[in-house]
Amino acid sequence: MGGSPARELFWDGVRLSLDPAEGGRPLCIDGRCLDAETVPGCFAHVCALSEDAARIPFDQPEVQEARRAALAWWIPLLGDTLVCLSTFSLDGVHCAGAVTVARHPHHFDQDPFARLFAGTTVRTDLFGVVAAPAGPLIERIAGAPWPGGRFPASA
Amino acid sequence: MATNDDESADPIPALVSGARFPDVELPDHTGRMRSLSEIAAGNPLALFTARGWWCPKEQRYMRGLVELQDEFEVAYAQMVVITIDAPEVQSAFRAGLGARFTFLSDAERRWIDLLGLLESTDTTHRPYRPAGFTLRPDLTIHESYNGYWFWGRATAEDLRRDMRAISRDLRDDWEPA
């Protein structure tokens, strides 16, 4: 598992960008999603708002339940269309939603992360394929956006 | 990552404490290829081999693992089950159980003989013999359990004890500085 633990992108409610000059709310995602070779023409379901007040602690039950749902049925439902997914983190405590990237948007109306913040579908060339997280682990590692991060190798 | 296609590969040693479990790569319950090291991702891993969905003993044991997954999900540890069921069968079984851990499918029986885990008494299904292994992130076996007889299987307390031992050894900050 290589790549950065977290990287920043920007969301203005309509567009996703890696360029802070384009404006938008900064959101941290699992860096592997942006480090991997990109898949052009994907669809991103962005379950986040552009307002900075739209945040919720990661440890809230609804955020935990969305992660459980992702492992239980969201990832299996997407099947081969899944490119990657990541929660959005703002700091060591707060979640700003999540993004699911797929080759087709067919199932986005069932996105469990849309229970946290309403979803918006956008076309994107920013993301690459990352192995879907394996369950049952849903906890974050050192504040990294789930499912990113990894403890340093030890003895 | 091992694929077992290399005939010159070293033979797999006995799956006992201290040996390294092969980095088995198989399709998961969604059909995606997964390796054990990828699933562990730096965490302790509880690995189970099981006969399949049809076995009442597996149905009971898996329900116990589903209860235990609520602890694994917050304890930086992972679980995985290998059976000879096809991915779509595993996916249905997993959904029925309410499991959130990963199933790996050895429907083609690519690993079962190499691992020495064929249940030779069931010549109809030729399934995996039930077994359990608690593994460090590098897949070194901490403890192994022979579940041919149900009472030989790892209990929840066995697994908690093993995960504690591995984590204590693994996490540098286990004891406060």
Image: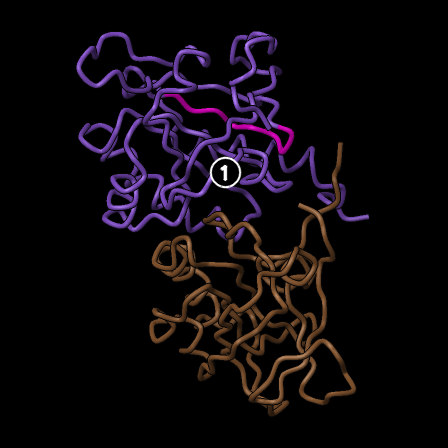
Q: Badge 1: how crowded within 10 Å, few (<14), some, or many (20+)?
A: many
Side of B88 where B160 appears, left or right: right
Task: Let me know if residue B133 is in the magenta part.
Answer: yes
The percent coordinates of residue B5 (x first, y second) are 52, 18
Q: Main secondary structure of the magenta part?
A: strand
Q: Nearer the viewer, residue B32 or B154?
A: B32
Viewer-proximal residue, A53 or A75?
A75
Rendered residue at 51%/26% (across/down): B24
Q: Amino acid at mark 1?
A: Arg
The chain coloured brown is A
- Tell whether A119 sits left or right of B55: right
In the picture as drawn, the residue positioned furthest to the right comes out as B177
Q: Name the residue beneath numbered marker 1.
A: B34
Residue B98 lies, with reference to residue B113, above or below; the image says below
Residue B45 at x, y = what percent? 53, 35
Q: Is residue A21 left or right of residue B31?
A: right
Identify the residue shown where x is 61% and y is 31%. B165
Image quadrant occupied by the C terminus of chain A: top right
At a point 33% along the width and 21% down the height, the residue shown is: B130
Residue B61 lies in quadrant:
top left
Q: Nearer the viewer, residue B102 or B44?
A: B102
Q: Which chain is purple?
A: B
Q: Chain of mark 1?
A: B
**The image quarter in which residue B29 lies:** top left
Callout 1: SS: strand
Residue occupying the far front of the picture: A40
Q: How is the image coloured?
A: by chain
Q: Quadrant of residue A72?
A: bottom left
Segment colored magenta: B131-138
Q: Residue at left 52%, top 76%?
A: A123
Instruction: Reply yes or no: does residue B27 show up in magenta.
Output: no
Q: Position of residue A116 (x, y in %)?
A: 45, 79
